[in-house]
Amino acid sequence: MILFKKIFFTFFIFSFLIGSDRIAVATKVIGSVEFVRGKGFAKSLKKGHIIESGDILKTKKGGFVAILFIDDKSALKIKENTELEIVGNNKNQTIAKRISLMNGTVRAQVEDQRNKDFVVQTSVSVASVKGTDFWMISDKSKGDSIIGIEGVIQLANKISGEIIDVCPKKGCWMNVKVDSDTVFVKFKDYGFFVPKSGIEGKSILMSGIIFRDTISVNRLKHYAEDAKKTIEEIESITQPEYKINMIAEAVAIRED
């Protein structure tokens, strides 16, 4: 009987919340945390507070808040000096979630979203996830950083770098140095290619989807063959590589 009451109570609360603009609950609050709803003034956020779609959360120095989404128990952990807006679209007892990060640091622990959206966006980046765990840091002076802990993240962004090498057969892929990383770039739906030679060392601006993925040994050998590596170099490839990949939708090569 006690178990039945608990199940009934949980179902009642879930039904009450899921049918409205209420999308999450604050499960932990440390220090100074505020929320703004609509055109209202900033108010102090306390543990147990119900988050509604469109709420803006702000953590001050030393502040921290953890929130839990009511439909699938996905969680956000929001660190100090962070400001973000949370929007949720309730449909068929599930919530499509969009987090707009103005600045600061947030950890998203996302359950399997199946046919739902879970998006974290900044002024320059859009990260789309289905079931993963990652940190996203937005700094107006330094740009955006994403630290993947588990799962796959698709990041729509504009990045620039220096071309290292290009597929000499078709120009259908290239390696680009971006800061201290090497990004392996292919082109969406093979809709366009780049010149097969003569662009190494040039600066390039790219727009598209960025993600981390494992490239198999067979695929690495295929790319090595495209690049006209020696048989010895190809046979030396025995381990897959976990690399930053990009499916570019548009590129612009700088002509000096």
Image (cartoon, grey):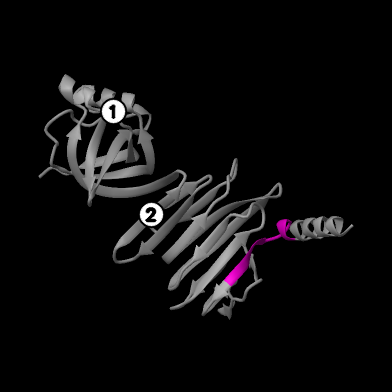
Q: Is 126 left, or right, of 19 in this rendering?
A: left
Decide which of 239, 63 is in the foreground and name it: 239
Measured Cα–Cα span from mark 1 to mark 2: 29 Å
Residue in view at x 58 percent, y 64 percent = 67
Q: Residue furthest top?
A: 231
Q: Where's residue 115, x and y in %?
A: 60, 41
Look at 86% across and 60% down and name the residue there.
2
Residue 125 visible in the shown view: no
Residue sitting at 32 percent across and 60 percent down? Answer: 143
Residue 123 position (above or below residue 82): above
**On the image, which quarter does residue 242 sit in?**
top left
Q: Nearer the viewer, mark 1 or mark 2?
A: 1
- The answer to which of marks 1 and 2 sits earlier in the sequence is 2
Say few, some or many: other residues with alpha carbon within 10 Å of mark 1 (under 14 / 14 to 19 / 20 or more). few
- The image position of residue 172, as x and y in percent, is 27, 28
Please tell me the numbered disc located at residue 238: 1
Q: On the picture, is 135 further left or further right than 255?
A: right
Residue 31 position (above or below residue 217): below
Residue picked out by circle 2: 146
SS class, disc 1 = loop
Q: Is residue 26 magenta?
A: yes
Name the image quarter holding residue 203. Answer: top left
Q: Is residue 181 visible?
A: yes
Q: Is residue 24 above or below residue 49?
A: above
The type of residue carrying mark 1 is Thr
Q: Quadrant of residue 138?
A: bottom left
- Image location (x, y in percent) of residue 246: 34, 40
- Left or right of 156, for residue 71: right
- Residue at 29% of width from left, 37% of height from top? 185
Instruction: Identify the magenta region.
Output: 17-28
